[in-house]
Amino acid sequence: MKGRTRAGAGALAALLAVSACSFVEGAGVAGTLRVLAGSELADMEPLLAESAERTGVELVLDYSGTLDGTERIVAGAVEDYDAVWFPSNRYLHLVDGDRSSVRGETSVMLSPVVLGVSASRAEELGWVAGDGSVSGVTWEDVTLAVEEEGLTYGMSSPAASNSGFSALIGAASAMADSGAALEREDVAGVEERLATFFSGQELTAGSSGWLMEEFERRRRDASGSGAVVPDGVVNYESVLMSYVPEAGEDPLVLVYPEDGVVTADYPLTLLAGASEEAAAAYERVVADLTSAEVQARIAETTFRRPAAAGVSERGFPSVVELPFPARREVVDELVAAYFSELRRPARTVYVLDVSGSMSGSRISGLRRALTVLTGADEGPLSSRGQVFQEREEVTLLPFSDEPGEPVSFVVESEGADRARRGLAEEIAALEVGGETAAYDAVEAAYSLVEEAGEDGYLSSVVLMTDGEVNRGLDLDGLFASLEGLPSHAAAAPVFTVLFGEADAEEMERLSSRTGGRVFDARDLDLEEVFREIRGYH
């Protein structure tokens, strides 16, 4: 994120005065901790470099989504790491009930998941007091604003990102209002209101960082892109406090639902298989990061709250912490319901290169990767949102010299298996030959989205091509053809997959222009890439 707000800086400056104890002093013992971490922790790297100077321990971070990382821990696929560091271990502890995968964990910082809303919109809704503060708003008030006032927002996928996962748990728990951990019968009792709440979701993402980037892009390009600009965004308090509006742009006000939130506590976690040397290094790093002075530095630079006991939280509004579900099946079923019943359904057009250069291992890899997405998934939570979901409309649009005939399936609750089998058969029947008219095919994909009309679907386009475009429209010609699209079509991002000899610069321009992302499949298995893309649907 870009800097910090004046209000946040002033409120947090007081934390710099709380330090009565010194930094942990290094004893000159060098060491390295290999850490699998949430991608949002990239903003901690300058502080970790300072910590390494004091402790003699370098943290080498490899980034992963929280729930993907949890799946890897449970599967025992973390032998290359000494520790993990994600926003939360709550789901991990539901899956790994005896905590056999964890040797130790320490919360380093805190950030509740809240709602940021454009100040002018919050005023229209009557949420802003005379002093500019917002208080007394509940999750039900937000739902009523969606239902009666057309409030819209962005939120990351609860099957890929911890912020979306926490928002789903928070909204359901608050609406159930049982005073205890959420149970299956509680979820059933609030599904109707949850569906109303999620009808306001105009933007989704596979990570909290990309969600905020796209929200900012839409706000700043609104006059030219025609894409829908959400009124707000559900995200970590720290991410929202870091947002700096451009001159003349409406600032965000933070809404802390008074009936409760779910807070990320960022536990630095030593894995069970770590060596004694790694354990000693871990203890040194934890002692340093939880010292009062470092806690104050974390708060000032990242806007995350201090987690260490005795360190002041002045400058941060108080929040009510909701109890987290105590049973895994409650969480799994809630996430499944989010995709099959609660959220707006997805419409995805897969624009598939079947030109001559795709022959051999490339087309077989594409068939295999797409076929995986058609199957029912009984795996961990992070896999739950990565197959074709109930109510989802999936269109296959092959192309070579020109766009082929699109084939569409809707994965209905009745006949879902039949739709998935039909998709698998179409994928298996893909044949290669001809040149590469990729941008003609993307134009055709947008025409399909436009023709569908404003029917409540969240639409996107996935372009997979292995070669340079050598037929039909060039990229500028495509951009010209997309001008003047209605808002529901203009809002559809293009996610491009780099593969083979595809022009990386052009693919980046296409994704950036449409609010999508580029996924690099040149060094990864296509199955992994398509599963990652699914986090953005």
Image (spheres, helix red, strand yellow):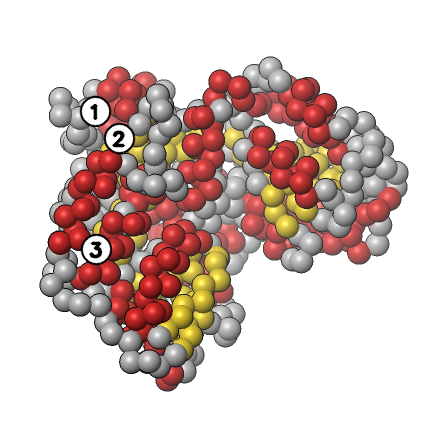
Q: Which of marks 2 and 1 is in front?
A: 2
* Residue positioned 51% across, 73% down in the render: 80
Q: Vertically, is 337 above or below 330?
A: above
Q: Of label 2 and label 3, which has the lower sequence position? A: 2
Q: Residue at label 3?
A: 296
Which circle marks residue 127 in the picture?
Answer: 1
Of residues 382 and 468, the one nearer the viewer is 468
Label 3 amino acid? Answer: Ala
Q: Callout 3 environment at 10 Å: few (<14), some (14 to 19), or many (20+)?
A: many
* Residue positioned 57% across, 45% down in the render: 533
- Give the image location of residue 198, x and y in percent: 39, 32
Residue 505 shown left or right of residue 362 in the figure: left
Q: Residue at label 2?
A: 253
Label 1 amino acid? Answer: Trp
Q: Callout 2 environment at 10 Å: few (<14), some (14 to 19), or many (20+)?
A: many
* Residue positioned 64% across, 50% down in the render: 520
Of residues 211 and 334, the one nearer the viewer is 211
Marks 2,1: beta carbons within 8 A: yes
Residue 520 shown left or right of residue 390 in the figure: right
Q: What element carries label 1?
A: loop
